[in-house]
Every structure is written in C-alpha cells, then in structure tokens.
Image (cartoon, helix red, strand yellow):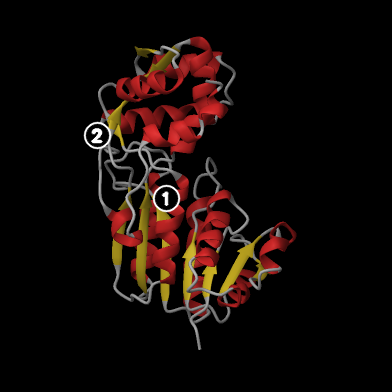
C-alpha cells in the first residue's frame, strides 16, 4: 500500500503549489494525497483529481487529529496567525500532537532561516518552538526553513518603482530571496520521499543580495532607477506608519530589516537542488517572468 501524504493549509498559495508538484511528479497519485483545509470547497478541482480533501482547523485539536487519520507523512505548513502572541505556536503544537496521535510516521514543517534566539524577526519564536515540539514528539522529521519569498518583493516593488525610492534599515545586510514555486517543488520532493532520516534543510535562492544590489537588479529589469535610502529602524517605522500601513504590521516589517542587517538572512545553500535536482531560479529570472506585474 502506498504511503498517504498529507498537506495542511492546502488551499493556501504554498499548499496548492505543493499539491500541483505532487500530482505532476508522476510518482504520486491523487488517491495518495490528503489535503487538509478550513475551506474544503476551495479545493474542488483537486478532489476531482482523486485527492481526498478533509476539513481541519489548527484551533481544534480533535478535529485535526481526525483529519490526520491514515496519514503516514504529514506536512505542516505554518499558519498565518501572525500578530497574536502565542496563538501560532499553540496551533502548530496542536498539529504536531495530532500527527503523533493519528499514527503518522514522519512530520515535515515549513520554518524560516536561522530561527534561533539571535533572530530579530518577531515570529521567529513560533518557528523555534515548533521545531522543538517536533523534535520532542519522537517522530522522524524534515524541517524546511523557507527563504524569504521573491513574491514578497512584488507587494512593495510597484510602489517603490512609482516613487523611485526604497527606504530600508537593512544596511549592507543580505537576503537570499527564493521563488515560492522552487520552495514548493523542494517540499513536494521531501514529502514524497521515503526517507525517514531527521534532517533540516534551508531553502534559499542562488545568491544573497543587499538592498542596493536588489535595487540594481530591479532597475536593470525595468529600466526604472531606484534610489535606496538608508534609514534607522525608528525612521523606517515612522515612514511606514505615515504611509498608512496597519499599526501591527509596522514592527513586523521593521524586524525583517533588522534581521537582515544583523546577517541572519545571509545564507545560501544548495538544498533546493539537492532535493529536486534543479537549481533555484535567480532574482533576475524571476523578475523577467513577472515584469508585467511590476509595470515595467
């Protein structure tokens, strides 16, 4: 009997891409996959392909345990409950416990690069605590520390290009942005693997770049010059507030720049290629693929 592969958060952007990669692999059938989501109706097209779609919420431990029944390898995609102290870690612990109680043999989890105590990212403790809970579960595991998505840049670059200025407190710190599709492919390969070794992978792009270097790549891709304006954390915070960003979001964004400045995102690995056999795409290639969205 084939192992049952379970994907949580299956109706989210990353979850859908993982499902697509599994189905496209040729080695995994729809009937081998369990997709867990709060919104089962959103995955009707996957149900039509044989995927078993089950309802499940990380806030309801017993419901989640029932959703995990018969799953051998469980992928826990970190939730979007950011900004509510303690909630996200509690949700993740519920998922780890549910996987263990349901009889799963292996847990996979999407974490972040360098989530240790030195991290300035406000939600790093959620990932650090979840990784520890997984290790304490006694199950074998694959922890996938996902690099910052290149897609995150797409949320701010159109406005940056329109103004011609990029305000940052990241200094000369570097970040190895990674395409979500490349991360999803690596996760799908790890999930479909028969490996029971406990391993940690850090999934990064092929190059770590400073904000100035990223701006130069964007300028080359679009033909629009970007001036990088280096500011302090406090100045960045005030600027983001003045720009109308929601109050809870501002310290989170500032923490990203502070973490970059401290060098905690300056990591490049070949783990994506190790898992998939393919090198991850560069920022240059990603921007070329998405040039229309930039307005360039």
Residue 199 or 82: which is nearer the viewer?
Answer: 199
Residue 53 or 48: which is nearer the viewer?
Answer: 48
Q: Residues within 10 Å of mark 2 (few under 14, many from 20)?
A: some
Residue most toward the bottom? Answer: 1
Residue 182, numbered label: 1
Q: Secondary structure at mark 1?
A: helix
| Residue 44, position as x, y percentages in the image | 73, 62
Q: Is residue 37 above or below residue 204?
A: below
- Is residue 201 in sight in this rendering? yes
User: Is residue 210 rendered to the left or right of residue 130?
Assistant: left
Q: CA distance from mark 2 to mark 1?
A: 23 Å
Q: Is residue 292 above or below residue 71?
A: above
User: Is residue 291 rendered to the left or right of residue 141?
Assistant: right
- Which of the two marks, 2 or 1, is nearer to us in this view? 1
Residue 263, numbered label: 2
Count every numbered label the image shows and give the total: 2
Q: Secondary structure at mark 2?
A: loop
| Residue 241, position as x, y percentages in the image | 53, 18
Residue 140 or 133: which is nearer the viewer?
Answer: 140
Q: Is residue 223 above or below residue 192?
A: above
Which of the 4 image quarters holds residue 137?
A: bottom left
Q: Is residue 226 above or below residue 255?
A: above
Residue at 43% x, 68% y is: 191
| Residue 75, position as x, y percentages in the image | 48, 65
| Residue 183, position as x, y percentages in the image | 42, 51
Residue at 56% x, 82% y is: 70
- Is residue 252 in sight in this rendering? no
Residue most toward the right? Answer: 41
Which of the 4 image quarters holds residue 48?
A: bottom right
């Amino acid at each position: 009997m084939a192992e049952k592969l379970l994907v949580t958060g299956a109706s989210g952007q990353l979850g859908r891409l993982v499902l697509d990669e599994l189905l496209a692999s040729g080695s995994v059938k729809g009937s081998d996959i369990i997709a867990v989501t709060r919104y089962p109706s959103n995955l009707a097209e996957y149900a039509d392909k044989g995927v078993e779609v089950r309802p499940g919420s990380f806030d309801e431990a017993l419901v989640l345990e029932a959703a995990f029944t018969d799953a051998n390898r469980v992928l826990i995609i970190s939730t979007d409950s950011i900004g509510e102290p303690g909630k996200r870690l509690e949700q993740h612990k519920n998922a780890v416990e549910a996987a263990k109680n349901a009889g799963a043999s292996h847990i996979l989890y999407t974490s972040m690069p360098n989530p240790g105590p030195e991290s300035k990212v406000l939600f790093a403790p959620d990932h650090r605590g979840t990784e520890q809970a997984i290790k304490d579960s006694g199950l074998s595991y694959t922890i996938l520390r996902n690099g910052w998505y290149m897609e995150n840049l797409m949320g701010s670059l159109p406005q940056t290009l329109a103004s011609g200025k990029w305000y940052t407190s990241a200094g000369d710190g570097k970040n190895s942005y990674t395409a979500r599709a490349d991360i999803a492919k690596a996760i799908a390969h790890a999930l479909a693997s028969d490996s029971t070794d406990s391993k940690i992978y850090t999934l990064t792009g092929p190059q770590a770049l400073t904000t100035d270097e990223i701006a130069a790549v964007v300028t080359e891709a679009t033909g629009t010059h970007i001036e990088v304006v280096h500011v302090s954390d406090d100045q960045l915070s005030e600027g983001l507030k003045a720009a109308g960003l929601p109050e809870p979001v501002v310290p989170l964004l500032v923490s990203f720049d502070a973490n970059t400045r401290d060098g905690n995102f300056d990591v490049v690995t070949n783990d994506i290629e190790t898992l998939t056999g393919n090198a991850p795409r560069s920022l240059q290639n990603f921007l070329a693929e998405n040039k229309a969205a930039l307005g360039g």
